[in-house]
Image (spheres, rainbow, N blue to C red):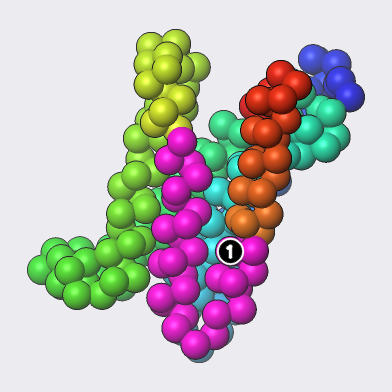
């Protein structure tokens, strides 16, 4: 399937860009209207973290969906989706630093060292930063093969995000288990794609 370039550039990509902003607008409106429940801080922290993980998974779904739909241009949306994962992860991170810990660095360091889910979450965010920084096209040209190696972290980050979420909720593990199943399906699809690439020369990108 091929979509004409003017339609793709002027309509589809802007639509994805705006659609990805909907969760943050809903969150802002819920905060303004005091509709975030008894613990607004917890709701804001969880929702921004959820969307960061969702966008990581959606960005990894691009390649399997491209093969399923035959829509090669879909890969050009992956950068937008990855940057939105970083955007929501940054909101999640800032919410923790500012509204939860009030930038008390001693308490933050204590959390990182003594609370494993914070440790894993912090590691995931730090690894996401270089992916966001190197997402521009000129960085792809500059880094070449190193760029490909670096961006393989995109497959590690959802694992860390799911572990972070799992350890956070402890007993109510329905959502992290759901995300883990989705990630497993993505990995299986990627593995099958790799097998096809090796046997009949098809690409998985």
Q: Is residue 174 left or right of residue 158?
A: right
Residue at x 76% of width, y 33% of height: 66
| Residue stretch rendered in magenta on the structure | 152-181
Q: Is residue 75 above or below residue 5?
A: below
Q: Is residue 190 left or right of residue 53?
A: right
Of residues 53 and 166, the one nearer the viewer is: 166
Question: Quadrant location of the N terminus?
Answer: top right
User: How crowded is the residue under tag 1: few (<14 C-alpha within 10 Å), some, or many (20+)?
Assistant: some
Residue at x 15% of width, y 72% of height: 110
Position of residue 168 measured from the top left corner of the image (x, y, whole percent)? 41, 76
- List the single residue furthest toward the right: 1
Q: Is residue 58 above or below residue 83?
A: below
The residue to which callout 1 is attached is 180
Q: Would residue 118 be visible to someone looking at this image?
A: yes
Magenta span contains residue 6: no
* SS under mark 1: helix
- List the single residue furthest toward the left: 106
Magenta span contains residue 165: yes
């Amino acid at each position: 399937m091929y979509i004409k370039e003017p339609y793709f550039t002027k309509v589809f990509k802007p639509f994805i860009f705006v659609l990805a902003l909907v969760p943050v607008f809903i969150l802002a409106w819920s905060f303004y209207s005091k509709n975030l429940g008894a613990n607004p801080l917890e709701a804001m922290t969880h929702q921004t973290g959820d969307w960061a993980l969702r966008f990581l998974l959606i960005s990894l779904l691009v390649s399997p969906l491209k093969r399923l739909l035959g829509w090669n241009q879909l890969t050009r949306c992956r950068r937008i989706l990855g940057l939105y994962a970083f955007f929501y992860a940054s909101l999640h991170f800032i919410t923790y630093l500012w509204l939860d810990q009030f930038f008390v660095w001693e308490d933050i360091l204590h959390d990182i060292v003594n609370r494993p889910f914070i440790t894993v979450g912090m590691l995931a965010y730090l690894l996401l930063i270089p992916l966001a920084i190197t997402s521009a096209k000129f960085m792809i040209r500059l880094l070449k093969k190193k760029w490909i190696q670096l961006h393989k972290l995109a497959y590690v980050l959802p694992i860390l995000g799911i572990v972070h979420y799992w350890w956070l909720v402890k007993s109510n593990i329905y959502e992290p288990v759901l995300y883990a199943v989705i990630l497993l399906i993505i990995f299986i699809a990627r593995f099958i794609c790799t097998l096809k690439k090796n046997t009949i020369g098809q690409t998985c990108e």
